[in-house]
Image (cartoon, rainbow, N blue to C red):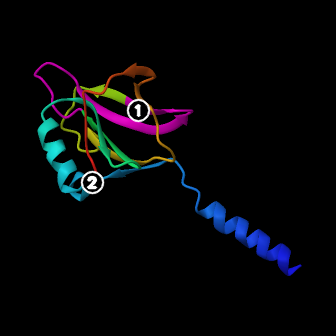
Amino acid sequence: MKKLLMLVGLIFLLSGCNSNLTYTEINSGKANKDLRSFLEVIDDENGAYLYYNGEKEIYIFLNGRNVQQGDKAAYFTKFDVEGDGDTLNVFYEVAYTEDDSNENLKHQALYKIRQDQKYDKIQAFANGAEVPFEMVSGSGK
């Protein structure tokens, strides 16, 4: 009986070490110096941006805060990631409004993605349609 309990305990311990594909939204002020520098460079351009931080972490920055007169303001409502073999799919929803003064709308978003494996390809999808990243950068850490 003790061996069985030890085996079950070992299985739980090892399964706890299994890394999963996860993401969290973070405040850009909490980003490291290299990432903050990247965000400063791209702050004036709308779009989706990819930043590599070593082998296990990537960041996705969604920017829609720059509004040209007469255009609608973009804001982001949903975000998700999904691994599909050797491809990491990034899904987000973007909507548009004429009221760009609404502080409750998310005109910018920064997501930290913890990869569960090394992906050969990363694809972004806005409202279900594949879109390119405006820029890809990263640090060699």
| Foreground of the two, 34 or 61 | 34
Position of residue 83 measured from the top left corner of the image (x, y, whole percent): 53, 37
| Foreground of the two, 26 or 70 | 26
Position of residue 122 measured from the top left corner of the image (x, y, whole percent): 41, 31
Report crowding for label 2: few under 14, some 14 to 19, many 20 or more residues within 10 A (C-alpha). Answer: few
Q: State the separation of the CA atoms marked 1 and 2.
A: 18 Å
- According to the picture, the residue beneath numbered tag 2 turns out to be 27
**Is there a contact, CB below 8 Å, between mark 1 and mark 2?**
no
Q: Residue at x 42, y 24 (%)?
A: 127
Q: Which mark is residue 92?
A: 1
Magenta stretch: give its range: 64-93
Position of residue 77 measured from the top left corner of the image (x, y, whole percent): 38, 36
Q: Residue at x 81, y 75 (%)?
A: 5
Q: Which amino acid, mark 1?
A: Tyr
**Element at label 1:** strand
| Precedes in sequence: disc 1 or disc 2 | 2
| Foreground of the two, 4 or 37 | 4
Q: Residue at x 16, y 36 (%)?
A: 42
Say which quadrant the N terminus sits in.
Answer: bottom right
Q: Residue at x 41, y 20 (%)?
A: 130
Q: Quadrant of residue 41?
A: top left
What's the magenta bit mostly, secondary-structure-wise? Answer: strand
Q: Which amino acid, mark 2?
A: Asn
Q: Is residue 84 rendered magenta in the image?
A: yes
**Element at label 2:** loop
9 in relation to 27, above or below: below
